[in-house]
């Protein structure tokens, strides 16, 4: 978990700032961005394992950003955040290729558990892509 | 042509669907405010945990977090107040309506929807209070139809100003998206029914950058009745 590189994307700056700091307090290497466009620019120049992505944002919405991530960086895992009370919007994210979703407000422990699961999945996918390591 | 029962049912269904849509949107917005408060109180807990380990946080930091939480509570409260006003618009079918208040309410309940399309809503305050006697709930729905029509055309975003106007005979609400040409609104059964019930009409002003909803100061259709034609 200490090696996890997490990108938090939400158009509410206070939310991003607090969540990033709380993740850092737990040893996660986290950075935040305030829009889908900024997130895609960051992904172009930096290694990221998991993106925590708000579904409804000004400008590019979460599903549009997710499509770009799936297309450009298929190994990067995405956890969607939704403010909708129903599970339908979260399921829409999963159908579009998200690893999982959380309904806001969510306990940080739930998010960290999902981040860990997402990192495990990323490792499995990377192994499948490159083949098992020789030491295995 | 629908009979009277069919028209009442149609009007009821449209109104209920609209109310549900606004309630869902407000619920979404409130959950976002709660999410921010949740993260900030969580961060305060982290700082207290570190304080217990002999690393006290700066007073300035705690004051800043506390101020941020108060700001979120204020924003959530404003949203709820606007939603409360909107909810009461169904109470009476024919009553005095302050058009400036109604404009503010609409901005309060629609701002997130507009922001998601890059449009910022603002209130164009007038000097005089303009009161009409009409159905506030039907009027909100008509303004929303116009609002959504304009937002759909605001390619690249912009500022949409909403304000009341009035004189001795007519009054109404202007929706102005400066620098854009707003295409004429298409016609729908619901729109035609609303215009009929409110005795209102929609026209285009200022080189098509403004949609104006005009109505009489006292709606003669005081019972909200539907004519059986």
Image: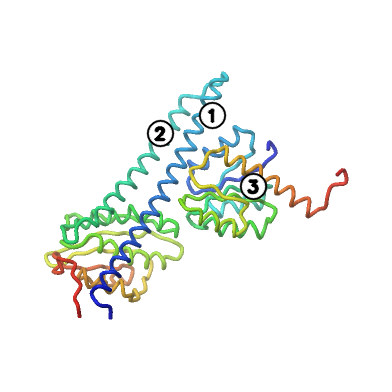
Query: Residue B215: where, in percent of width, then height?
Result: 19, 68
Q: Are marks 1 and 2 in contact (CB under 8 Å)?
A: no
Cα separation between marks 3 and 2: 31 Å
In this figure, which residue is indicated by the disc labeled 2? B67
Name the side, left or right, on which B119 lies relative to B88. right
Check the residue under mark 2 and report the chain it is in: B
Displayed quadrant of residue A2: top right
Name the side, left or right, on which B138 lies relative to B79. left
Name the side, left or right, on which B158 lies relative to B215. right
Query: Residue B4: where, in percent of width, then height?
Result: 23, 74
Q: Secondary structure at mark 2?
A: helix
Name the side, left or right, on which B135 lies relative to A126. left
Task: Reply above or below: A111 against B4.
Answer: above
Query: Residue A43: where, in percent of width, then height?
Result: 64, 51
Task: Reply above or below: B69 against B59.
Answer: below
Task: Give the foreground label among 1 and 2.
Answer: 1
In this figure, which residue is indicated by the disc labeled 3? A50
Query: Mark number for residue B199?
Result: none
Badge 1, how many Cα within 10 Å: few under 14, some, many 20+? some
How does the figure colour the protein chain or chains? Answer: rainbow
Q: In the rendered image, which quarter contains the C terminus of chain B?
A: bottom left
Which comes before the other along the chain, label 1 or label 2? 1
Cα separation between marks 3 and 1: 23 Å
**Residue at image point 46% right, 24% down:** B59
Query: Mark number for residue B46?
Result: 1
Q: Secondary structure at mark 1?
A: helix
**Residue at image point 58% right, 42% down:** A111
**Residue at image point 67% right, 51% down:** A76
Residue extending furthest toward the right:
A134
**Residue at image point 62% right, 50% down:** A42
Q: Secondary structure at mark 3?
A: strand
Check the residue under mark 3 and report the chain it is in: A
């Amino acid at each position: 978990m200490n090696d996890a590189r997490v990108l938090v994307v939400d158009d509410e700056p206070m939310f991003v700032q607090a969540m990033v700091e709380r993740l850092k307090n737990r040893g996660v290497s986290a950075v935040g961005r305030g829009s889908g466009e900024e997130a895609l620019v960051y992904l172009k120049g930096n290694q990221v394992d998991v993106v925590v992505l708000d579904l409804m944002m000004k400008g590019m919405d979460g599903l549009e950003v997710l499509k770009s991530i799936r297309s450009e960086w298929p190994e990067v895992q995405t956890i969607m955040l939704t403010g909708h009370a129903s599970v339908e919007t979260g399921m829409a994210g999963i159908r579009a290729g998200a690893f999982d979703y959380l309904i806001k407000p969510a306990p940080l422990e739930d998010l960290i558990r999902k981040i860990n699961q997402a990192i495990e999945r990323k490792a499995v996918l990377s192994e499948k892509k490159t083949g098992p390591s020789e030491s295995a | 042509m629908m009979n009277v029962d069919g028209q009442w049912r149609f009007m009821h269904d449209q109104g209920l669907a609209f109310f549900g849509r606004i309630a869902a949107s407000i619920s979404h917005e409130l959950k976002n405010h709660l999410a921010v408060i949740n993260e900030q109180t969580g961060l305060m807990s982290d700082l207290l945990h570190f304080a217990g380990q002999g690393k006290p946080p700066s007073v300035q930091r705690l004051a800043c977090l506390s101020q941020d939480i108060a700001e979120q509570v204020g924003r959530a409260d404003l949203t709820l107040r606007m939603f409360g006003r909107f909810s009461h618009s169904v109470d009476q079918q024919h009553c005095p309506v302050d058009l400036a208040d109604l404009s503010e309410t609409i901005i309060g309940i629609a701002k997130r929807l507009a922001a998601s399309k890059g449009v910022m809503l603002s209130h164009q305050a007038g000097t005089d209070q303009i009161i009409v006697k009409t159905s506030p709930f039907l009027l909100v729905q008509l303004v929303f139809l116009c609002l959504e029509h304009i937002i759909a055309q605001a390619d690249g975003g912009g500022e949409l100003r909403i304000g009341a106007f009035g004189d001795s005979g007519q009054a109404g609400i202007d929706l102005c998206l400066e620098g854009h040409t707003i295409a004429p609104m298409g016609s729908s059964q619901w729109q035609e029914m609303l215009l009929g019930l409110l005795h209102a009409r929609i026209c285009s002003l200022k080189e098509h950058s403004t949609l104006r909803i005009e109505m009489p100061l006292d709606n003669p259709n005081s019972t909200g009745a539907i004519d059986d034609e």
